[in-house]
Each structure stands twice: as C-alpha cells, then as structure tokens.
Image (spheres, rainbow, N blue to C red):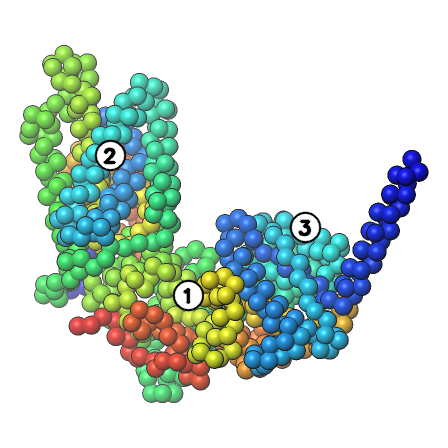
Amino acid sequence: MVALQVIVGGLLSGAIYALFSSGLTLIWGMMNFINFAHGEFVMLGMYVALLVVVWLGGGPAVFGIAAALALFALGVGIYLSLIRHVLRGPMLAQILSTFGLALLLRYTAFWIFSANVVSLPQTSLAGTINVGGIFLPLAQLAAGAVALTLTISLHVLLTRTTVGSKLLAVAEDRTAAMLMGIRPDRMQALAWGLSAGAAGIAGALMATAYPWSPSVGETFGLIAFVVVALGGFGSVLGSLYAGLIIGLIQAVSAFWLGAIYKDIVVYGLFVALLWFRPQGLMGKA
Amino acid sequence: MKRSALLFAAIGMAAAAFTAATAARAADAVKIGIMWPLTGNAAAAGQAAKAAVEVALDIINNAHPELANLPLAATAGLPNMGGAKLDVVFVDHEGNPSTAQQLATRLITQDKVSVLMGAYQSSCTFTATAVAERYGIPFMVGESSALNITTRGFKWVFRATPIATDYARTYMRFFADMKNQGRTIGSIAIVNENTDYGTSVGDAIEAEAKKANLPVAMRIPYSASSTDVSAQVLQLKQKQPDVVIFISYTADSILYMKTMKNLDYKAPMIIGDDTGFSDPSFIPAVSDIAQGAMNRSAWDIGKPGSTTYKINEMYKARTGRDLDDTSARNMQSFFALAEAINRAGSTDPEKLREALANTDLKPDQLMMGYQGVKYDGTGQNVLASTYLIQLHGKQYELVWPETAANAKLQWPMAGWAQ
C-alpha cells in the first residue's frame, strides 16, 4: 500500500515538472534559445497567485488563469523588448541576456516581496481524499490533472493546428517562413507568451502546495533543464514523459534509499541515459 | 611667533588637563570592549544585541531595586569596587573574522579594555578569542554557538550561552520527565537539513540520545531546498516514532507540516529546533495544522510584574520591539560577566579570570531559563539549558519545565482538528 502511495505521489509531482518544463522545451527546443529565466517565471506565477488571493480573493481557477495571463503578457513583453534584439547578437549574448534577466527578476522579487517565506492561505483545495488507503492531497491532484491536460493541449496545439505549424515553420527556417507569409516576430512572441504562461500556471498550481521565497526559481529552473534534456529538445510529449519519470524516480529513491540520495539517483540515471541516447527520449537524432 | 607659541602652550595645557580628567574617570570605570556586526548583513542582530546590553548597562550602573534578584541591579555600579561604573566600547567587525581579530588587538592594546565580549558570528568569535587568549584578557562569548570556540584548550574564554549539546540535553531531560509522568517515549526520529547547521545539531541530539539509552528509530537528512518531502513523511509514518525532532529552515518546516497533514500522519509529538519553527512565517502558515508542535527558547517575557517582564519593558521603550532570544542570551552573558568583575574587585586580568572561572549563579539570579551559570575547564557553561515552548492557537506558550511554565503541556499534540 505504501508503495502505491509513493508511486502516486511521485507521478503527481512529475506532472507539474512536466508542465513547467514544456514551456522551456518550446523555447529551447524550437528556437534554439536557452532561457535561464524560466525558473523565475514559475516563481513569478507563484507570487501572482498570492497577490490575486490576497487582494481579490477567488479560488484556484481564478488565480491559476490570472497567473497564466500575467505571465503570458510578461513573456510577450520580454520577447519584444529584449529577446528580439539579442537574437541578432552572438550566441554568447543570447545566453547572458536571459541569465541577466533571471537575476533581474529574482532580485526585483526580493525587493518587492522580501526574502521571507510565504505560502498561499488555505484555499478550497486544502483537503485530502482517501482512495482505498491512498491519500491524495486535493491540491496536488488538481495540479497534476491540470498539468497533464495543459501539457497535452500544448502538444496538440503544436502538432495539429495551423498556429502550431506556423510556430514550427519559424523555428525551422525563419526566412522560408517569411516567404510563406508568416510573420516570425508574431510567432516567436506567441511562443514566448505560451512558454511563460505555462510556467506561470505551473507556479500557481505549485503555490497551492509549497511555501516559497524569491529564490525558489533556482530549484525549478534546474529541474526544468533536466526534464527538457531527458525528454528531448523540442518535444512537449517528451517533457511530459521525462517529468513523470523524474518525479517517480525521485519519490521511489527518496523513500527506499533516503532523501539525500534521490538526486544522485535521478541525475545518475539521467547521465547514463544521455550516454546512450544524447537526443533524449523523444528528440530527433 | 611668540603669540602662536603661547597658543600652542595653552592648547597643550588644556589637552593635558583634559587627559588627566578622563584618566581620573577611567580609573573608576571598568572598560569592556564589545564587538558585534553593527553594519553588514547581520547588522540587525548586532544592533538588537547592542540595545540589549545598553539596557543591562542601565540596570547595573544605576540603582534598580525593583529587579533585586539580578546581581548588581539594586545598587548603582559595582559595590565591591566602590560603586565603579561599567564603560562599554562598542566596535563593529562587519561580520568579517579578520576585522574582528584586528579590533580585538586594538581594544586590548590601545583602548586598554579589561575584558572583551562578542562577537555574534562564530567565525568572528573564533578569531577574536584567539587574540584575547594571546594577550591574557578574559573574553565572554555572548551567544556564538560553534562548538570549536571552547575546545581549543583556552584559559581566557568563557561562554554562558547554551550550545547544541545543551539543547540536546534539555530534550533528553524533557523526555525523562515525560516518561516519569507515564508517557510512552519508546523511540525518537531526527529529521535534519543536511548542511553544517542541521548535521551538527542532529549529531549532538543523536549522541545525547545514545547516552540516555533512547533509541533513535531513524535519522533523516534531507536538502532544505526540497520541493517534495512526502517520501520522508511516509518513512516516518511507517516507523511510528513517539517524537519527531526537526532541525529545519523555514520553507521546509512548513512543507513538512503540510505534507504530514496531506498524508494523514500525526506524530504523537513534534519538536522543532528553533530556526524554521521560529520564523515569523511559520505560525501564520501552519497554525491550524500544527497545534501542539514544540520549539525551544531560553527567553520568556513572563508575567507582568516579573523581572523578565520589566526587562522587556525597558528594552521595548528603547527599541519598540520585544526582546528576542538571541539578544536576551547576549544580555545574560553580559550580566554574568559583570557579576564576575564585581566579585574580582579589581581589573587585574588574572583576578578577573579567576572570578569568571569561579562563577556560580543560581537560576533565580538569571533572566534566562538556564539552570545556572557555572563554567567547566573549557569555559563552557555546564548549566546552560533552554525552556520548551508549544504552539497553542496562534502563539507559543512556555510549557516546560513545569516550574516556569505558564501553560499546560498538550501531549499528544493535537495537530489539526478533525
């Protein structure tokens, strides 16, 4: 019974890993652009959720959507004001620009929200349901379900719709896409909006379960990079699998081996897998 | 030319007169050099401690008969030294160990202080005490808790504040007391974050538990930045220890309380070792699910009219805040130092050292919840201990030892309402 509890818990955290990583894979995998500020987007999503709950009230649906919209807008804004310009510069400038952005966002959050740990006031998702001896915290259950749905929707959007095809076309060959009548700037701004929006809603979902402070983005950013690399660059479905696998391995190794060994196990397996399959689980060789 | 020579002579004479005057005053007053981080990232703690010592100075240098149980409070100044006052020179080491070392040298050689005290950060205390030892000047460690400060075989270093082993011993005495009252404590679990802080405190508790023949069912080290602690909570749930001791920072201690609730695991008793459990965000976040969780504090404001309450009022008048555990421990160290100076009746270093070594303060002569102040050969106070407090509603109440308690211990802890 306890084994099942461990597995379910691992998969639930894995689903959330998948959601905030899918945004990174969109930028990293498709635009070949490493966004070091991704973990900070998750962090800002958490604070948006907190502000909405404290100022406006409202349940998880309200603050989840608010975080998604706010971060979507931020993502578009960052693309237009910063990324668009550094894309013309050398590779190193691109890398350093988002690194600087990450620090800017983190320390702005320190300035506004202080370094104190905060947590969301009790929401309607406070309870736990007991399914035949397995405890399912409502917050994590809802977060997991929403994360799964959104990650799959994002996958469908990219692979089955016109907008998705346009995004992929721009990623593939910017000039050719322009010749086909696609406006690359619009598409890339949309990609940044979707990426940040997914991170924002993931943050809002995590905020229902975890206390945090402005430095939390560091932890999430690292997980997102590993998930994307394991899942395969550019594959949203890949990050879904990778997120679930990492969540599961962490939970299982933390329970049977001990909490301090879980990251050794996860990253050991990760390195081993990349050894055999450098393109990741779902990436194209 | 002649006029300017005259002017110089006049200035010289005035200066000489002035020096003579200060010298005369200094002959009465006992000079104490105190170094703290008064700027830098620990400035808040240093400034709070400085305010606490200024209150202590007021209590010692002026007559405060209303605080008569504290040594030196009733009289003005030090009675054994003809009412001499204490004169404190505060200096700022900015949290930098090498600055602390230089300042210790300066205070001893230039300011000619009779004793030193400080220095908040253990790293600064470590370097400054080495200077005091070399010059043969007594050093009172205010509240730094690193074990190695008193394990170097120094003769001139004294520490009144409790350290990790004292807290561990207090927990063991508490458990023994609980067993005497018929409560079951078959085994304990220690959950500690895995940096220096959590590891060293965890080790100290495990060592004391071994001495007390109390089985440690499990030791769970973990990383404080974990975003998920359900595996650890499930491990605890499987072993069912009677008490779980957490040595945790803020976010992780809140996460543990929430996860325990989510996975429906109620420990009979939880003890948090200060830090995360004392963070201002802990109570608002988990007060409805962690009712009865215990914590430690050697400082208690006490009932209106008590000595501690009056001290707190004096501190509040100066700073606008209640006195905190850290500053209070510094203040107690200062009182213990002053008591020894008065007993020595002289500023001769060897006599001061002897007086400090022979210190024997009883619990009712203290403002803190120690069992007394008495130093062993290393200079560590062997009677240092702490109160245990418990979360009742939205605040901690002192529940143990019973002689000092102002609320009844809740056992097992309620956790959350069904």
Q: Amino acid at mark 3?
A: Gln
Crowd around label 1: few <14 · some 14–19 · many ≥20 (10 Å): some
Q: What is the chain identity of the residue bearing mark 3?
A: B
At a point 84% along the width and 56% down the height, the residue shown is B17
Q: State the SS at label 2.
A: helix
Give the label on residue B274, or none: 1
- CA distance for labels 1 and 3: 33 Å
Q: Amino acid at mark 1?
A: Asp
At a point 14% along the width and 40% down the height, the residue shown is A151
Residue B288 found in image quarter: bottom left
Q: Mark 3 — residue?
A: B102
At a point 60% along the width and 77% down the height, the residue shown is B64
- Relative vertical location of residue B7 with respect to residue B258 in this rendering, above or below: above
Q: Mark 2 — residue?
A: A74
At a point 23% along the width and 52% down the height, the residue shown is A54
Q: What is the chain identity of the residue bearing mark 1?
A: B
Between B299 and B210, the one lying in front of the other is: B299
Between B56 and B132, the one lying in front of the other is: B56
- Relative vertical location of residue B358 with respect to residue B281 in this rendering, above or below: below
Residue A186, image x, y percentages: 17, 23
Q: Earlier in the sequence, mark 1 or mark 3?
A: 3
The single residue placed furthest to the front in the displayed view is B3
Q: State the SS at label 3.
A: helix
Q: What is the chain identity of the residue bearing mark 2?
A: A
Q: Nearer the viewer, mark 1 or mark 2?
A: 2
